[in-house]
Image (cartoon, rainbow, N blue to C red):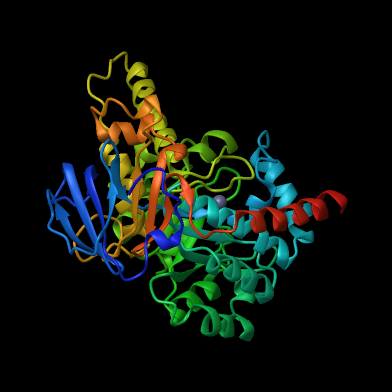
Amino acid sequence: MSQNAAVNSNSFPSGRPVVFRNGTVLTIDPSLGMIEGGDVLVVDNRIAAVGRQVVVPESAVEIDASGGILMPGMVDTHRHMWQTALRGFGADWTLTNYFMFYYINWGKIFRAEDIYAGNLLAAIEAVDSGVTTTVDWSHGLQTVEYADAAVDALEAVPGRFVLAYGNLLGAPWVWTKAPEFADFIRRRIDGRGDMLRMQLAFDVTGDPAFPEKAAFEVARDFNLPVTTHAGVWGATNDNGIRLMHEHGFMTSSTIYVHAATLSDDSYHRIAATGGYASVSAESEHNAGQGYPPTWMLRRHNIPVSLSMDTSVWWSADLFSAMRATLNADRSREHMEAHKRNETVMLSHLRAEQVVNWATLGGAQALGMDSFIGSITAGKKADLVLIKHDQSPVMFPLLHPYGHVVFQAGRGDVHTVMVDGKVVKYDHRLLDIDLARAKQAVLKTVVHGTRT
Ligand SMILES: [Zn+2]
């Protein structure tokens, strides 16, 4: 398509195939690898063909991917989207400041409409920056009315979401048992298929009585994966992991957020039960949960996904996550070697691995890798084209994986496709009402600063 044409959703009429032409395609599919000068054909909501000079139907709309990098949509496995309503407010906080604010002050005055506002802006931000699947770690859901508001916002934006249902002001063994909670699942989640899924989000305190047992049982009854902040200095520790393990609640669908301050014994238990870590390196660097743990997780063969945690402090795009993760891992490797008076001669963690964690790793953590996470014929078409012809940064393109991690940023996201639908093209969102989201967030900011 011409760069100058007025672009709207009519440029990509539903039912017409779309072909990305002549890009550097990072398929993240181990059997395909990287394809330079590659094409990807999308028919309906699925990837129909991947290769060079792909023959396409005459009706196909062409997107020129030359000079760009085409990769799978990124997956964020832990983001408190509701907190986007106060973007950047806590830039200089510690974790203690954060807990005080959300448990004692702000968290209590947050209304359902504030959840809606934060989620709406956060969901738009995710899609805009090429994050096509986001786990909304939504622990401000004081009642199901709040949860309805959260889902209303997620449904208003054409992204793929997982509502990780939580309530930091209540006890998980109480709110999971409420009849209206079961009713919410029936009303809002059942039947939504691949676009909206659900997890249970709560933390395990390490109380020897293990009151969280009842919440784990609810998760099992509803077949919901559990996501939990684990290994957070001063908050959750090895006792929580041990209790989960002893009661048989550590499974391959469990996600351990941060997993930073933990013993070898806990890492063994996670590895043995097949769970996934969600590493938020930018968060761990700043808030003090512990050192970003990929250097440890790699040692224990624990699979990694990436996340951004919250934009009340940090950025919310996975370019930042990839960069912070690679920086942290290599920094640690150097420092550990220096302690032994040695010099690192080979960078063990490669840029390619980190791009894999940001895409397929996230899909695997969520149990969604059968249909997203790589550019593979037959999978759902969640794609990101990184291309910026006016930027000096997109040239030359000598190490495409390294380019994604160290050179590109969300301003370079040219086109985003979710479930076969073009939702951003030529750096502009299509049919997404950003002004409405800003208005909603403004009301929340006024409410918060007046109260
Ligand atoms: Zn978190």
Report the number of discs: 0
Quarter of the picture holding the C terminus: bottom right
Is residue 357 placed above or below 398 in the rendered structure?
below
Residue 268 appears in the rendering: no
The image quarter in which residue 371 lies: bottom left
Image coordinates for residue 33, horizontal then vertical, percent: 16, 45
Is residue 123 placed above or below 69 in the rendered structure?
below
- Which of 290/399 is in front? 399
User: On the rendered structure, is 7 left or right of 402?
Assistant: right
Residue drawn at point x = 60 percent, y = 73 percent: 173
- Which of 189/158 is in front? 158
Q: Kindly give the residue lying farthest to the top in the view shown.
A: 341
Residue 64 appears in the rendering: yes
Residue drawn at point x = 22 percent, y = 23 percent: 346
Image coordinates for residue 319, horizontal then vertical, percent: 42, 39
User: On the rendered structure, is 96 left or right of 346?
Assistant: right
Is residue 23 placed above or below 243 in the rendered structure?
above
User: On the rendered structure, is 20 left or right of 281?
Assistant: left
Image coordinates for residue 403, horizontal then vertical, percent: 32, 32
Residue drawn at point x = 64 percent, y = 45 percent: 312
The image quarter in which residue 205 lies: bottom right
Residue drawn at point x = 43 percent, y = 82 percent: 191
Image coordinates for residue 155, horizontal then vertical, percent: 53, 69
